[in-house]
Image: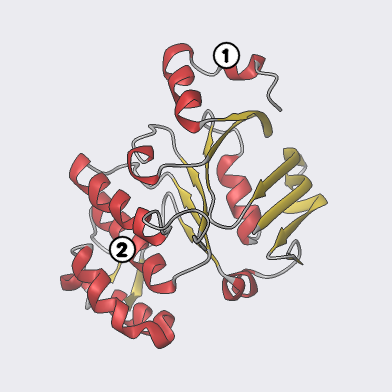
């Protein structure tokens, strides 16, 4: 599904990602952990194709195509989707209108998923305008569920929301990633950034990675990695040889 090979990324004159290699197969969900400022969000933005980043070396392959220089809308057409940590407010666009445009032949999903995420009363409201933290996250997840991307990137989906919203959002994301389908038959893949690990209660992730200072420090079982981080902080990851 996604193959990143020897990726180097700069912001301005500073290189923030160094020699990144990552391979995510169809049906797999990977979790990315690491301290603040380590480059996790930058990696997701580079995969999605956002501006302000300069890929100086390496390649991003998606479904066998080199998308390294491809614009965002073309990557979205291929099947990429992303949930932002801090999505913008769009005062001039109602949520229902956006969903009507993006749903295409999946218009029937809008009503079903909006009720499931308790967003059905928000259709005539401007996107994220006056929304609480939990409502913003539910709105973002709803947009992804309607879009139905094959590869889902989630930047701290549980941040800034209460436990009830985490449960609802986690259940919806698990549904989006087809976690009720055996991995052999699963078509959706994901890359999820988390600090707290709460989202792991819903996603049953396949692999975990730790990034520090723009470099992958270790890889392994995501729950075991989280346990080590909670016990010893990131110092154990810095010494890890699983690279």
Question: Residue at the spot x=44%, y=55% of the render?
Answer: 182
**Which mark is drawn over residue 139?**
2
Which type of secondary structure does the marked residue at label 1 adopt?
A: helix
Picture coordinates of residue 6, whole percent (x, y)? 80, 44
As displayed, is residue 118 above or below residue 92?
above
Inter-mark Cα distance, 1 to 2 = 36 Å
Which type of secondary structure does the marked residue at label 2 adopt?
A: helix
Picture coordinates of residue 79, whole percent (x, y)? 56, 70
Q: Quadrant of residue 15?
A: top right
Label 2 environment density (alpha carbons within 10 Å; few <14, some 14–19, many ≥20): many
Residue annotated with mark 1: 235
Question: Residue at the spot x=53%, y=65% of the render?
Answer: 150
Question: Residue at the spot x=77%, y=52% of the render?
Answer: 55
Q: Quadrant of residue 209?
A: top right
Exactly how many numbered labels are in the figure? 2
Q: Earlier in the sequence, mark 1 or mark 2?
A: 2
Q: Is residue 145 left or right of residue 29?
A: left
Q: Nearer the viewer, residue 238 or 177?
A: 177
Q: Nearer the viewer, residue 67 or 161?
A: 67
Q: Nearer the viewer, residue 28 or 230?
A: 28
Q: Is residue 130 left or right of residue 235?
A: left
């Amino acid at each position: 599904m996604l193959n990143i090979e020897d990726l180097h990324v700069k912001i301005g004159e500073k290189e923030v990602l160094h020699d990144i290699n990552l391979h995510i197969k169809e049906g797999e969900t990977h979790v990315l952990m690491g301290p603040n400022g380590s480059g996790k969000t930058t990696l997701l933005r580079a995969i999605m194709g956002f501006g302000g980043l300069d890929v100086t070396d390496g390649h991003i392959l998606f479904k066998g195509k080199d998308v390294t220089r491809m614009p965002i809308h073309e990557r979205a057409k291929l099947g990429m989707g992303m949930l932002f940590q801090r999505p913008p407010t769009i005062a001039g666009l109602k949520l229902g209108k956006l969903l009507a445009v993006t749903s295409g032949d999946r218009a029937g999903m809008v009503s079903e998923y909006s009720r499931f995420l308790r967003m059905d009363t928000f259709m005539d409201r401007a996107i994220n305008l006056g929304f609480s933290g939990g409502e913003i996250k539910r709105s973002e997840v709803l947009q992804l569920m309607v879009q139905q991307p094959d590869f889902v990137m989630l930047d701290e989906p549980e941040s800034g929301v209460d436990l009830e919203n985490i449960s609802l959002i986690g259940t919806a994301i698990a549904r989006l990633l087809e976690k009720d389908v055996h991995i052999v038959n699963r078509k959706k893949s994901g890359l999820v950034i988390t600090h707290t690990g709460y989202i792991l209660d819903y996603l049953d992730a396949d692999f975990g990675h730790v990034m520090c200072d723009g470099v992958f420090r270790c890889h392994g079982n995501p729950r075991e990695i989280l346990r080590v981080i909670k016990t010893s902080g990131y110092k154990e990851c810095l010494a890890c040889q699983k690279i």
